[in-house]
Image (spheres, helix red, strand yellow):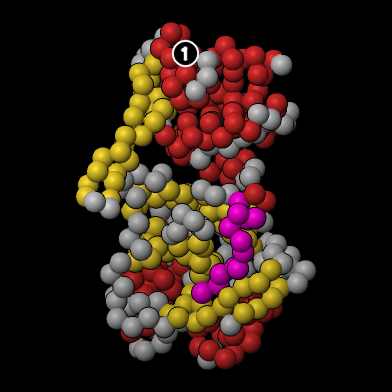
Amino acid sequence: MIIKVEEGKGIIDVLHDGLVACLKIRKPIAICYSAFSPTCEYYYKAAGFDPYMAQQLDQLLIDGDDESILDTIPDFLRLFRTGEYAVEIVRPEGVNRDRHYATKANDLYYDFGDVWLYTQPEETLNPERIQYYETMIKNGGRPKVIVYSSSMGSYYWQHNFIIDGHHKTTAYRNCGIEPVYVRISMNFKAEEEFAAHKTLFLSYDFLLDDNDRKLITTHFPMVHCSDDLISAHYNHLMDDMLRTTTNVMAHYVEFFRKIYQQQAPSELRWLMARLRAILEGAIDRPVECFYTYREDPQGPNWRVRWPVAYVVSDNATFCEWIQLAFNTSWEEMNKAVNY
């Protein structure tokens, strides 16, 4: 079922900046993101909220038929932003052993496939309410949960933020029965969505700790050239990471190369400041800095590309790395900025 929302209130929303999915209910209340590590680690943070959104659906979600629920959903969706939404009622068969429930306010989990994110920490739930739903489920009742399914474009992974039904979800889990749920997802173009929310991180920054900030800036470089609080905050986080890292990874150097090749004056100045942060860090301890790939033939039609790094430990080795990575000298790069 496709529903078009016009003049949506934007009270409930899931926003994406390319790395982080952020659930907002008036303000950011939960995020999840991936470090893109070999073990597919995902990180989840939640501030919690007062669950008021689906009050008009409460009784229908407990004992209403599918048609009645779907008839009422358009009114509920007016709390969301303007756009096109897919809505379906899912009745799983059997037990989904690949599903993972992120139940804590701060959680680390792995990509098990189907992930449900509690937007209220489980420890804050009412045990009596959970027991009420357990009894209902054991007697054959199937109260519905509402989830917002979030897909992150080219980095394909899908997570389900629980919008309404935390007590029901826990009761289903305790009974060993798959939840029946209403799944809502928004149709959007990934690149347009990411570009529109480039500064989203400043909104959810209060949910992060220092480790989160380092992981996000490590795996998701962005150019911020403006003379404003957002740019200053992000660039400060990035420089801290570059001064303390021992490995400037391939995707970072490739990102820097594109900036240099484009030769936009403001972005060049931004780039030079970031490269100086790497040099400042290398003076304190050696840093492995990527500069090329080595191809390793694995068969007639298959090659593995391994990143090759150059150890930077002082000004001389830094200049040598610049020549290897950017095919120009540090002196020429400085001249381009000052031209």
The amino acid marked with disc number 1 is: Cys
Residue 18 versus residue 334 in the image, above or below: below
Residue name at image x 43 percent, y 19 percent: 321
Q: Residue at x 58, y 49 (%)?
A: 17
Horizontal relation, residue 295 to residue 57: left or right: left
- Asked whether the viewer can see residue 183, the reply is yes
Q: Position of residue 157 (x, y in %)?
A: 43, 59
Mark 1, other Cα within 10 Å: few <14 / some 14–19 / many ≥20: some
Q: Is residue 60 left or right of residue 138?
A: right
Give the image quarter of residue 245: top left
Nearer to the camera, 206 or 337? 337
Report the residue at 47% width, 77% height from top: 181
- Residue found farthest to the front: 300
> Which quarter of the rendered picture does the N terminus lie within?
bottom right
- The residue drawn where x is 65% and y is 75% is 76
Residue carrying label 1: 319
Residue 271 image position (x, y, % from top left): 59, 25
Pick the residue in front: 60 or 30: 30
Q: Is residue 240 visible from the viewing direction of this image? A: no
SS for callout 1: helix
Foreground of the two, 258 or 247:
258
276 left or right, relative to 316: right
**Residue 182: percent from left, percent from top:** 51, 77
Residue 65 horizontal/vertical position (percent): 53, 91
Please tell me in which quadrant of the rendered image residue 193 appears: bottom right
* Residue that extends furthest to the right in the rendered view of this protein: 7
Residue 152 part of the magenta segment: no
| Magenta region | 183-194
